Image (cartoon, grey):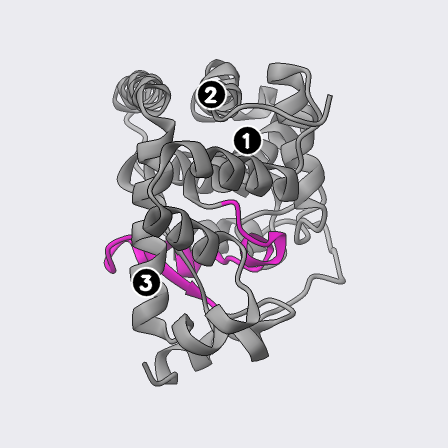
Amino acid sequence: NCWATVEDMETVIPFHLSRYKDIVQKCITKPTSVGPSDLTFSVRFITTLLFLRVKCSRPMTFQHLTVPMFEKCKDDGGYIDQRSFKTSGTYLYDTIIIDEDVSRLIDLYVNHCRPLLNPTSDFLLITSTGSVLSNLSNSMTILVYEAIKKHIHPTRYRQIIESASSDRLTLLEQEIISQDQKHNSEVARVFYKKRLSREVAAKGKEYVEKMAGDSRVTVNKAISTVLSDIERVQHEYDTSFLPPDITAATSSNSNVDFTGAIIVDESSNSNTPE
């Protein structure tokens, strides 16, 4: 089955939350007992979280996210204006917004799971060998199937969102979601300057949450409960969050040498005119 409802998709993250919590707690309390399958799952979970809770964007938008970009967004209202994707010359920006609860879930991965993968670059999503994750769509498809027994990839999920919006939202709200999710050439010419990209992203996020309704409220409660449980464990073990420079220093001590990671220069972002 290759179709699902919005409500079906909203059950995916809660379905996997308990396993993610167990893995993070194991990384905190007994890191030597964490296996490769646990770490692979943690990456898949964060990847799926980005697609389902942040924005069902181009896989390359998330593939080229870096830890410094994620850390920086915390001081910028959760906004990341991504320019590292194949059509950036046409679209300029793909703006995503990471809210507080999602940020806290990603923090747990960055501080406790990701270092055990011996990262070879700053990319947020990495493989079991420490290199940049390439098949993000597959990660989401696997976790969605485990939760609802349906084969849903990011493109199909965008179609589900747009289809549902035609029944549940106004024409203006539908148009905003379409602009945020799909990016046709007219939208690129008119909207994809930095400031307007952020406005579209904020409204798009608001309308997707409106469409999800009570299902999204249930997801938010489940996330909040898991975060509270993990934070209690952190307190018991006196484990604080490691800043990115310490995490990077830790990973650099690995004796394993991996090559082939893609490096993206984000320095041009700050100089880009709005």
Q: Which mark is residue 45?
A: 1
Q: Amino acid at mark 2?
A: Glu
255 up-or-down from 13: above or below: below
Q: Quadrant of residue 261?
A: bottom right
**In this picture, residue 59 sits left or right of residue 71:** right
Instruction: Tell me, yes or no, whether the two marked residues, 3 and 1, touch with CB atoms within 8 Å.
Output: no
Q: Amino acid at mark 1?
A: Phe
Q: Which residue is mark 2?
A: 7
Which residue is painted at 38% across and 60% down in the image? 80
Q: Which residue is mark 3?
A: 198
Label 3 element class: helix
Q: Position of residue 123 (x, y in %)?
A: 56, 56
Image quarter hosting the N terminus: top right
Q: Residues within 10 Å of mark 1 (few under 14, many from 20)?
A: many
Q: CA distance from mark 3 to mark 2?
A: 26 Å
Q: Is residue 91 magenta?
A: no
Q: Quadrant of residue 166?
A: top left
Instruction: Tell me, yes or no, whether the two marked residues, 2 and 1, touch with CB atoms within 8 Å.
Output: no
Q: Amino acid at mark 3?
A: Arg
Q: Position of residue 248 (x, y in %)?
A: 49, 55
Q: Which mark's residue is nearer the viewer, 3 or 2?
A: 2
Q: Which residues are magenta?
A: 56-82
Instruction: Tell me, yes or no, whether the two marked residues, 3 and 2, touch with CB atoms within 8 Å.
Output: no
**In this picture, residue 95 sits left or right of residue 46:** left
Q: Which mark's residue is nearer the viewer, 3 or 1?
A: 3
Q: CA distance from mark 2 to mark 1?
A: 19 Å
